Image: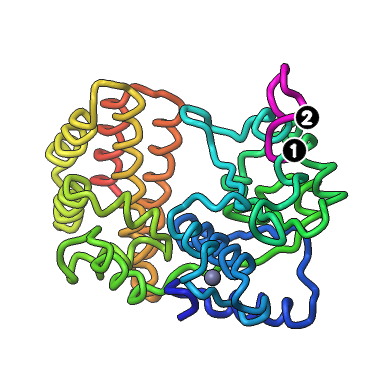
Amino acid sequence: MWMDLVGHDAVADRFRHILAEGRLASTYLFVGPGGVGKRQFARRLAECLFCPNTADEELAACGQCASCQLMAAGNHPDLLEVTLKKDKRALQIDQFVGDGEHRNREGLCHDISMRPALSNRRVAVIDHADTFNVNTANALLKTLEEPPPRSLIILIGTSESRQLPTIRSRAQIMRFAPLGASEMASLLVEKGMVGNSSIATRVAELADGSLDQAQAMATDELWEVHTEAVSVLNKPVIDSVHLGKIVHQFAESAGKEASAKRDALIAVLSLVARHYRRSLRADPASPEIPRILARIDRCLDAEYQVDRNVHLQTVIQSWADDLARS
Ligand SMILES: [Zn+2]
């Protein structure tokens, strides 16, 4: 296991190889499901490149020097991290080129052009690259095209297709695989996200290799409503009124804000859809397949309606009635 990171030895090997040949590019785009450890990997890579006691191609860090200690404390001056600002759903242009008053004198493009403070290079890690809009991406473009010497930019997104062509074409792509179910189950227990290993195994099987998904699922309340909903759905005759009631109560308990209720409802719907997808995988020859596919579709329709602000109780009850009828 490279640098205590589960599941990404293959990517570490590629970087080792690239560094041994002196072919490190100036910009990389890490893609893969949320929560598999791409940002952690980027930080670990920076730590190795910063550490003066190890050669780059070793892809290792001594853990003792001032640089390694600053990395461990989370405040190395040559690591520049950009993520979503609080309450924003997309990266903002001023994060790259400064706001109106400080245009081109602040922001990532300015900071990365400065001489390294401690190490012999600067590393920028830009999270949520999926959210770049054209203007913000254009603000970064010059830096990508003419990267400052000894700088490394790592963009983190979920899939290649969600990136703007201007960014995608200027970055080397590194793909991160989803975590395996058993790797994830032990991680969930290790991180204290799930109390017992039998729930961890079930959560891991449903999480599609993403720790973010697993974390969202692993709240006790959501897991309880999911377990209860699935037990209703597994009965030969589905009690749609009871099903609607437990899901509605869960959504209502998520908070006063309509958005919190909607998020809670989407979490249940997507968990139920995952439950059905998993049963498809478990028995691909089952005579129940048309019914299961119809139910997955019905969950997706309901998620779509929630997104479109259809009245929640209406969405829930018609979803429960349709599942009961299918
Ligand atoms: Zn070190």
Is label 1 in a helix, a strand or a loop? helix
* Residue 16 vertical placement versus 315 (above, below): below
Would residue 237 be found to the left or right of residue 176 on screen? left
Q: Is residue 311 above or below residue 196?
A: above
The residue positioned 78% from the left and 60% from the top of the image is 150
Q: Which mark is residue 104?
A: 2
Residue 78's spot in the image, x, y percent?
63, 52
Q: As displayed, is residue 79 above or below residue 69?
A: above
**Residue behind mark 1:** 110
Q: Secondary structure at mark 2?
A: loop
In the rendering, at what x and y percent does residue 86 appear? 47, 30
The residue closer to the viewer here, 196 or 275, is: 196
Residue at x-position 70% and y-position 35%: 96
Is 188 situated left or right of 120 in this image?
left
N-term-proximal mark, 1 vs 2:
2
Please state which amino acid type lies under the numbered disc 2.
Asn
Q: Which residues are magenta?
A: 98-110
Task: Residue type at mark 1: give it.
Answer: His
Is residue 108 covered in magenta? Answer: yes
Q: CA distance from mark 1 to mark 2?
A: 6 Å
Q: Residue at x 79, y 81 (%)?
A: 21
Q: Write down the quadrant of residue 269 in the picture.
A: top left
Q: Are marks 1 and 2 in contact (CB under 8 Å)?
A: yes
With 26 as the anchor, is 276 left or right in this view? left
Q: Position of residue 107 (x, y in %)?
A: 68, 34
